Amino acid sequence: MRSNYRSIGGYIRLVDERNVDLAVETLLGLSVSKQFIPSVANTVGTNMRNYKIIRKNQFACSTMQVRRDRKMPVALLQDFDEAIISQAYPVFEIVDTTQLVPEYLMMWFSRQEFDRHAEFLAVGGVRGTLEWEDFLSMELPIPSLAIQQEIVNEYNVITNRISLHEQLNEKLEETAQALYREWFMEGIDDDCEKVKLNEIVQTQYGYTETASLEIIGPRFLRITDIAQKYIDWANVPYCKISESDFEKYKLNSGDVVVARTGATAGYGKRLHKHFPACVFASFLVRLVPNESKWNLFLGLTVDSQAYRDYILSNAEGSAQPQANATLLTSYEINKPDESKILEFNRIVEPFFDLVENYHLENQKLSELKDLLLSRLATVEK
C-alpha cells in the first residue's frame, strides 16, 4: 500500500441513536445502488421507537449478503437533516471531518474495486456477510483536506450535470406527452374516426433465447451476461443480442418496442435516431408503423399512462400480467389527419433530439465519473 493509505476504522465510529420519542417520521430504506430510498416496508403494528435515527452526513450500511449481491450497500445521508432506518443497519459517522470529508469517503465506497474487496472479505457461504472488523480494516488513501475537497468538488460538478440533464429530459418528455394529449385526446369530437393500432402497425415477437436481465427502471432493462460482440451495452434499453439471428431481430430507429409480460407489461419506448444496432428479447413486441409519419405519434401513445392502464386491465395471468401482440395492438385511438401528424412531428421531434443528446452526453459524463473514482487509488498527499 502507499504511505498515505489508512484503515477506515481509524476515522469512523458507530452511532446508535433510537427514535424513542417518535420525533422522526421520515422512514428510509437502503438500496444496493448505494442510495437512500423511501421505505416500502409495512410498518403497521411496528414499534418505531426501535428504529435508528440517522442524521445528515452520517452513513448507513448493510454488511449482510455482500457476496450474493456483489456489493456492499452503503450510503451517505445528504437530502434530509434526519430520518429513521431499520435497526438492522449499522449507522456510523466520521470522527473528525477536518481529517476526512464525508463525500470523499462516499466516493471511495462507490468504487467497483471497493465492492470487489468487500465481496472477497465476506464470509458465510453464498450470501456472505462482511464482518464489521473486516470492514474497519479496509484501507483508503487519505490525502490532505484540501485535495479531498478538490476531488469532491470535481466529482460533484459531473454528478450535478448528469442530474440536470436527467431533470431536463424528464421535463421534455412530460411536455411532449402534454402536447400529445392536447392535440390528439382532449377536446376531440366523439364522432372522430377511430382506428386501432393494428391498422397502422405490424408486429414481431422478440428473440426467445434466455438471458439474464437487469431492471434499470420501469421502462428500461439491459442484458448483464451477453458478450460485447456488436455494441457497448451500457445504458441500452430493451435489448437482446444473438449472433445467429442478429439481422432477423435487428431494431431500427423509429421502431417502437413494448414489454408484454411481468412488472413492465405495457411499458413502451420509441427508438430515436442514434439507437445502437441490436436485437430484442422475447419479453418484447416490436411495433413497426406502416408509414414513418406514425413513429412519433405511436411512441407517445404507448408511452402514455392511458395505454398502460388499458394493457394492465386486459392482460391475463394471475401471478404476473401477460399481454400478447393482439392485445398490445387492439388499443383504439382517434385517427388524426396526415397534415396534423406532420405538423406535430415538426414541433415535437426536436424535443427528442435534445433528450437523446442529453442522454448521450450523460453516458460520457458517467464514464468520466467512473474514471475519477478509479483514480482515487493513486491520489497523493
Image (cartoon, rainbow, N blue to C red):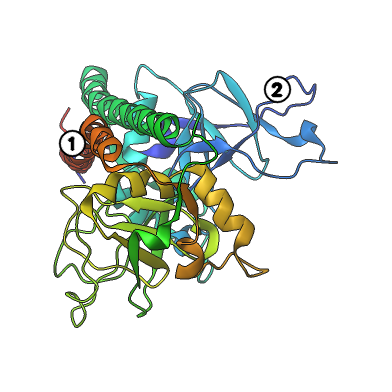
* Residue closest to the far front: 191
The residue nearer to you, when weighing 227 against 66, is 227
Q: Earlier in the sequence, mark 2 or mark 1?
A: 2
Q: Count neighbours of disc 2 (C-alpha within 10 A) and say few if under 14, some if 14 to 19, many if 20 or more.
A: some
* Residue closest to the far bottom: 244
Give the Cα separation between the discs numbered 2 and 1. 42 Å
The residue nearer to you, when weighing 28 against 184, is 184
Q: Is residue 91 above or below residue 57?
A: below
The residue indicated by pointer 2 is 24
Say which quadrant the C terminus sits in: top left
Q: Helix, strand, or loop for circle 2?
A: loop
Q: Helix, strand, or loop for circle 1?
A: helix
Q: Are marks 2 and 1 in contact (CB under 8 Å)?
A: no
Q: Position of residue 97 (x, y in %)?
A: 40, 19
Q: Is residue 120 visible?
A: no
Tag on residue 357?
Answer: 1
- Name the amino acid type tagged 2: Val
Q: Position of residue 268 (x, y in %)?
A: 40, 53
Q: Is residue 131 above or below residue 378?
A: below
Q: Position of residue 297 (x, y in %)?
A: 33, 44
